[in-house]
Amino acid sequence: MALAQQEASALLRDPDLKVVDVMRTDFRSCNAGTPMTEVVMALRQSRMRILPVTEAQVPVGIVTETAVMTALAAQPATCDGLTARDLMTGHPTMISSDRPLSEALRMLPDAGGRLLVLSPERRLDGILTLAELAPQLSEIGLSQLVTRMLGEPGGNLDDMVPPPSPPVAAARETDPTEIHSKKSQAQPHAWDSPTGAHPEPVPLLTASDLINPLLHVSDAMTPSPRTCSPASTALEAVLIFRDADCGVIPVTDGGKPVGVVTDREIALALADHEFDLARTPLSDLMTGDPITIASDATLEAAIDSLGTHGIRRLLAVDDSGLLVGILSWPDLVPLLSDRGLGLAVSRIIEQR
């Protein structure tokens, strides 16, 4: 569902921008003969959901986390012999770095939310995704773009933006350089009020401007999701990812959630478990202490929890703490106003 060129220009804050002005250049790539384990390591290090495959710096395909999962499901015992050539999808969508950004915006929905950017010499120069385009769009424009992209076959919000950043503490361990806060360092004003009281700001938007305050988690969640136990193996999870076409599996003990495991976690674990991943228990791979929410909580509370914890999904539980569903950002998309959807996607991207 391509955008018309004039329509794409209207969505941009600055229609004069070119692709080179916003493209991402800190990416990793590999050649077609790169072993699968090295491909997975490159995906992990780049913190992107795709890995371009090049020959003489010319793009010939891309490898996705989904392709890694598919290979694990098809032949878990022989994946050590696979290379990027076996995993890649050929004919990636490409655009020249000197093209108007409006042209990239027009192409993005049909390209699965990612474009490979070529230099004037036709060599790989950058990558352009929703994450790079979002700051250049108004909230309404971003909402319209995401709606179009989700309307494409296989459209998935998780595939359109990079995975979340690691916690600050973990980031400092791997990179000792100082991590600066994005918050303003400005000092408070000296208020003119005789009492010195800080006036309460008037909100530009209220929660009801974003989503119906009468809706509850149970109205939007995906009920009765497939689950695993901590003793289940990675192979069992891979088969569920394939058969249920999902990206996350709750891990439960006695019906109560004790963790979650994502397709990304399983795919990237191959770098550490090259020869025994299929037999590795999920207790070694899952993220414990999952964030839960009551199924009768309001969607306003759910959105606040998603944003506060910097996550993309919540596990919904009943009064007894038993898992009854999963609520993710894509579940909220049909229920959000245009302004609300734009704000929600912006919030996700800010958590990269």
Image (cartoon, rainbow, N blue to C red):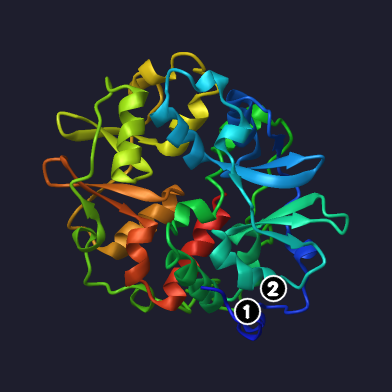
Of residues 199 and 304, the one nearer the viewer is 304
Q: Is residue 16 above or below residue 250?
A: below
Q: Amino acid at mark 1?
A: Ala
The residue where tag 2 is placed is 103
Pointers 2 and 1 in contact (C-beta within 8 Å):
yes
Residue 81: tell me if it is visible. Answer: yes
**SS under mark 2:** helix
Of residues 316 and 31, the one nearer the viewer is 31
The residue where tag 1 is placed is 8
Residue at 42% x, 22% y is 76
Give how far across and how far down residue 203 sits, in percent: 46, 77
**SS under mark 1:** helix
On screen, residue 255 versus residue 177, left or right, reads: left
Q: Based on the displayed image, in which of its 4 quarters is residue 75 positioned?
A: top left
Tell me how far mark 2 sits from mark 1, CA to CA.
7 Å
On screen, residue 322 versus residue 299, left or right, reads: left
On screen, residue 149 versus residue 306, left or right, reads: right
Of residues 239 and 83, the one nearer the viewer is 83
